[in-house]
Amino acid sequence: MITIVRGDELGEPYRRAIAAVFTQGFAEDFSFFSKDPDVLADAFAPMLLLEHFHVACVDGEPAGLATLTNGDQEVFDPSAATLRRHLGPIRGTICYRVIRSWFMGPSDGVSHGATEIGSVTTVPRFRGRGVGTALLQHLITLPGHSSFLLEDIKETNGAALGLYRKLGFSEDRRTPQRFPRLAGFTSLISMRLDLE
């Protein structure tokens, strides 16, 4: 059974497990900092602002997540010292700068009244079991939201793009990747869903 619960409602005992879902889901993106998922989860756990994380649990176990924010709300409160302690002085500093530049600040497409859904991921062993669908259906039916944005989806992520289209999202814009060979993809796609 899949249930969706906000991170702060799950509470502090789940912080590390929520961080593990995030770092497992984006392990490829964070592999420069560490290939060890436990090290990454320990590094990321303290900076999660749990009130913005919505967690899909399968039989009580965190299996997927997404963030939900309006305007300039943040989902992370990173500490350079904490990241350095877990990842080392050089990688910790670089990780801190990457988080500040890529994951913080308002998204280009978020305007007054729009809600951003971000960091959508499912733990690999739970993929293909409807976790992402249940999570997104839950988010887009929450009261008080009528327009949703999904930003920075790799054009190579066919599974995610297919799910978003199935739920009614359409492509809003494409941003070319500056170094496609190094990144492994040529553009980032933003998608939008307007319910009204």
Image (cartoon, helix red, strand yellow):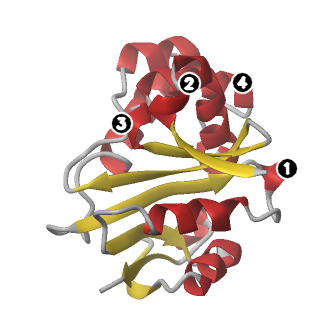
Q: x and y percent of residue 62 in the render?
A: 69, 39
- Looking at the image, is mark 3 or mark 2 earlier in the sequence? 2
Q: Is residue 61 left or right of residue 4?
A: right
Q: Residue at x 39, y 32 (%)?
A: 49
Residue type pointed to by label 3: Arg
Q: Residue at x 52, y 28 (%)?
A: 44
Disc 2: which residue: 15
Q: Of helix, strand and loop, which one carries label 3?
A: helix
Disc 3: which residue: 97
The mark lying in front, picked from 3 and 2, is 2
Q: Is residue 90 left or right of residue 97?
A: right
Q: Quadrant of residue 22?
A: top right
**What is the residue that sits farthest to the left in this orientation?**
112
Q: x and y percent of residue 34 in the render?
A: 66, 31
Q: Quadrant of residue 129?
A: bottom right
Mark 4, other Cα within 10 Å: few <14 / some 14–19 / many ≥20: some
Residue type pointed to by label 2: Arg
Mark 1, other Cα within 10 Å: few <14 / some 14–19 / many ≥20: few
Disc 4: which residue: 38
Asked if labels 4 and 3 touch by Cβ distance under 8 angstroms, the answer is no
